[in-house]
């Protein structure tokens, strides 16, 4: 266990050995197919149903399809690094576990704290979206007066989002394999609806809607994307706004990156996979390839069906635009209704897999003593029930009582930060532990990890200044928690102290 203090590292061998502890042992019953389903299940959701139209209208115009391609390239580079790490260290915790083996405990804690932001805030944000779509679907059945929110003692309570979190937490407690089967059914439904959007929408595409492909930049003051709300790169480069133009395209790529979040969740299930060295890389890369094709197809169809200016948030009628908007404008209300039902199904699995990822990260951190060890205890179903309950409570509160605005960008900045550390970690581990067996190897190291780091940094620079300020505040809070609790309770630290005492005696 090399390193001391903040930089003490947990060896790969010790990480793998810890997976056999009886009280914290997870059940290995997932296959490459299960992992691909999880990846597609979580990635096809909020992004494709809510971000596509709005991003085209507010930031990129028809070039939103190119924004998806740019985001996919960055994700693919990072995905290669995740695949190698997960096949080398098949342990729950994803980027947290990988960082512990390469950069040391403090960096591992920071990335674990960062993943809490990514998964928990992401689950709460998508849960709010699910509740909104549930209200639409219930309106078809019972009439427009049905609401998924209620006023209780002056508070707006989103009972729809709360119900979803409770049901999904129960599913995850009963077993990961059952969760995978539920995901398979629901994912099949939403993929079919995405294909319906592409092929049915083609008949309404008008070539003139693709011109100009990259609209001229909006003048300063014409939009709200100025000051702390514009992208950091636009502000540093002297741009007046990040609406349309090249700055708008780059800002759109950073925003639609939210649509790809999820393939990294596959890595958190490595410890529950039968043959992780082969299955995890296949699950990560396979799911990313599938959703990229679907995303580009949907974005090209949606901006071809309607002028991008009508998809802007500020366009009449007021409100955020979704995929259903483009079909409703073309007089296909029944198709818009079908898409709303598909979105409800799609967002269900997104929240479930985000909750799964959050629980596994919390489980790994607790097993290492950086959080209370009791959270790592597994029950009769081979799942960490206590950690699942805690996550359900926290996400349930956030989804029930808080608004979802700006949460997408908060999730993005946290995820990109994790991607950077994982990409750097592959390079470091190749140099420090070339002897480790690797089920998958990233080609052209260090070129691919370096490109992944640069791509993620580029996307981070195109997030808003306000998002960066919030992210820094969250990281500062994490540092305080580490020094107050985690450092003194670290299991690795206690082992190293015992070894030192024994050597002295």
Image: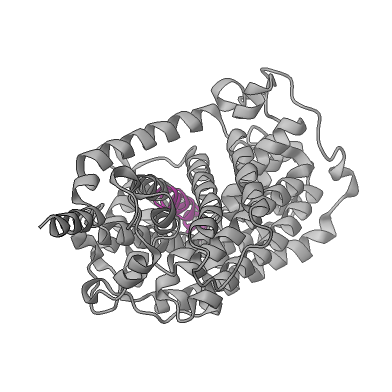
**Quadrant in the picture for the N terminus:** bottom left
* Residue 499 placement (x, y as % from top left): 19, 59
* Residue at the image point whose x is 62% and y is 40% from the top: 459
Is residue 51 visible in the rendered image? The answer is: no
**Residue reaching furthest front?**
504
Whether residue 401 appears in magenta in the rendering, the answer is: no
In this picture, residue 62 sits left or right of residue 142: right
Q: In the rendered picture of this protein, how many numbered marks are placed on residues? A: 0
* Residue at the image point whose x is 68% and y is 46% from the top: 53
* Residue 397 placement (x, y as % from top left): 30, 48
| Residue 293, quarter of picture | bottom right
Residue placed most toward the observer, 53 or 180: 180
* Residue 106 placement (x, y as % from top left): 34, 45
Main SS, magenta region, reads helix
* Residue 128 placement (x, y as % from top left): 44, 50
In the image, residue 296 above or below residue 247: below
In this picture, residue 200 sits left or right of residue 80: right
Q: Which residues are magenta?
A: 118-141
């Amino acid at each position: 266990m090399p390193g001391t203090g903040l930089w003490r590292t947990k060896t790969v061998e010790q990480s793998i050995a810890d997976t056999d502890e009886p009280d914290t042992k997870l059940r290995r019953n997932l296959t490459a197919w299960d992992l691909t389903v999880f990846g597609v299940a979580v990635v096809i959701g909020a992004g494709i149903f809510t971000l596509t139209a709005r991003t085209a209208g507010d930031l990129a115009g028809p070039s939103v399809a190119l924004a998806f391609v740019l985001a996919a390239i960055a994700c693919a580079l990072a995905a290669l690094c995740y695949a190698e790490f997960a096949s080398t260290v098949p342990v729950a915790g994803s980027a947290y576990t990988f960082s512990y083996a390469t950069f040391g405990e403090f960096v591992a804690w920071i990335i674990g704290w960062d993943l809490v932001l990514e998964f928990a805030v992401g689950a709460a944000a998508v849960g709010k979206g699910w509740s909104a779509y549930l209200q639409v679907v219930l309106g078809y059945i019972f009439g427009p007066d049905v609401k998924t929110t209620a006023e209780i003692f002056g508070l707006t309570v989103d009972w729809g989002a709360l119900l979803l979190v409770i049901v999904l937490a129960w599913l995850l407690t009963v077993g990961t394999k059952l969760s995978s089967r539920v995901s398979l059914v629901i994912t099949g439904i939403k993929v079919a609806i995405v294909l319906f959007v592409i092929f049915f929408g083609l008949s309404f595409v008008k070539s003139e809607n693709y011109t100009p492909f990259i609209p001229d930049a909006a003048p300063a003051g014409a939009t709200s994307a100025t000051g702390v709300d514009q992208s950091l790169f636009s502000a540093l480069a002297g741009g007046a706004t990040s609406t349309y133009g090249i700055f708008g395209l780059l800002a759109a790529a950073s925003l639609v990156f939210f649509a790809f979040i999820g393939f990294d969740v596959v890595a958190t299930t490595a410890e529950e996979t039968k043959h992780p060295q082969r299955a995890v890389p296949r699950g990560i890369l396979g799911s990313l390839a599938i959703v990229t094709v679907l995303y580009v197809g949907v974005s090209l169809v949606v901006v071809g069906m309607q002028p991008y200016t009508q998809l802007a948030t500020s366009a009449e009628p007021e409100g955020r635009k979704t995929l259903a908007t483009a079909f409703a404008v073309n007089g296909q209300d029944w198709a818009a209704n079908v898409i709303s039902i598909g979105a409800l199904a799609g967002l269900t699995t997104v929240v479930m897999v985000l909750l799964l990822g959050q629980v596994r990260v919390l489980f790994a951190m607790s097993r290492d003593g950086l959080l209370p060890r009791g959270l790592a205890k597994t029950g009769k179903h081979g799942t960490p029930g206590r950690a699942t309950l805690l996550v359900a409570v926290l996400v349930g509160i956030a989804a029930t009582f808080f608004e979802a605005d700006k949460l997408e960008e908060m999730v993005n900045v946290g995820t990109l930060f994790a991607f950077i550390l994982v990409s750097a970690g592959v390079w470091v581990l190749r140099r420090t532990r070339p002897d480790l067996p690797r089920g998958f190897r990233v080609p052209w190291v260090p070129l691919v990890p370096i490109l992944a780091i640069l791509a993620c940094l580029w996307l981070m620079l195109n997030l808003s200044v306000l998002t960066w300020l919030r992210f820094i505040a969250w990281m500062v809070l994490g540092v305080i928690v580490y020094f107050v609790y985690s450092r003194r309770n670290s299991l690795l630290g206690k082992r190293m102290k015992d070894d030192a005492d024994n050597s002295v005696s």
